[in-house]
Amino acid sequence: MDETRIKRLRWRTRRGTRELDALFGGWLDERFAKADESQRQAFDELLDVQDPDLWDWVMGHARAPRTDWQAIIDDIRARHRL
C-alpha cells in the first residue's frame, strides 16, 4: 500500500464534523486496504464532494449520483446501522 496515498486520504477524510470524520476515516481504516483499485479511486473522488451532500447521502436523505459512490455510502451506513 502506498503510504503517501494513505496519508493524503487520511488528511482528506478530516471533514467539517466529527461524525463525517469518523465515518469516512473508519472506511479508510477498515475497508480501503481490501478494496480493489476502482473502489479506491471512487473513494478518493468521493472525498471531493461537499460535506452537506455527503451528510445527506450518509443519513439516507438522498442518494449519490454515482453507483460506485453509493456502494461506499451503503457500506458505511450498514457498518454503522444508519
Image (cartoon, helix red, strand yellow):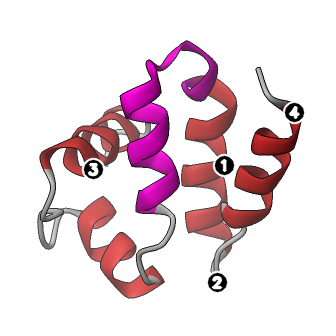
Residue identifier under label 4: 3
Label 2 vs 1, first from the N-terminus? 2
Q: Which residues are magenta?
A: 31-46
Assess whether residue 42 is covered by the magenta stretch: yes
User: Can you name the residue that lies furthest to the top here?
Assistant: 34
Amino acid type at circle 1 is: Gly
Amino acid type at circle 2 is: Gly
- The image's mark for residue 16 is 2
Label 3 vs 2, first from the N-terminus? 2
Residue identifier under label 1: 25
- The chief SS type of the magenta part is helix
Residue 65 horizontal side relative to residue 16, left or right: left
In what element is the residue under mark 2? loop
Disc 3 from disc 2: Cα separation: 19 Å
Q: Mark 3 touching mark 2, by CB under 8 A?
A: no
- The image's mark for residue 69 is 3
Crowding at dot 4, Cα within 10 Å, few <14 / some 14-19 / many 20+, comes out as few
Assess whether residue 55 is covered by the magenta stretch: no
Identify the residue at horizontal 56%, vertical 66% (top origin). Answer: 20
Disc 2 from disc 4: Cα separation: 24 Å
Identify the residue at horizontal 77%, vertical 40% (top origin). Answer: 6
Q: Position of residue 16 (x, y in %)?
A: 64, 83
Residue 31 horizontal side relative to residue 82, left or right: right
Amino acid type at circle 3 is: Trp
- Work out whether 81 lies above or below 59: above
Disc 2 from disc 1: Cα separation: 13 Å
Label 3 vs 4, first from the N-terminus? 4
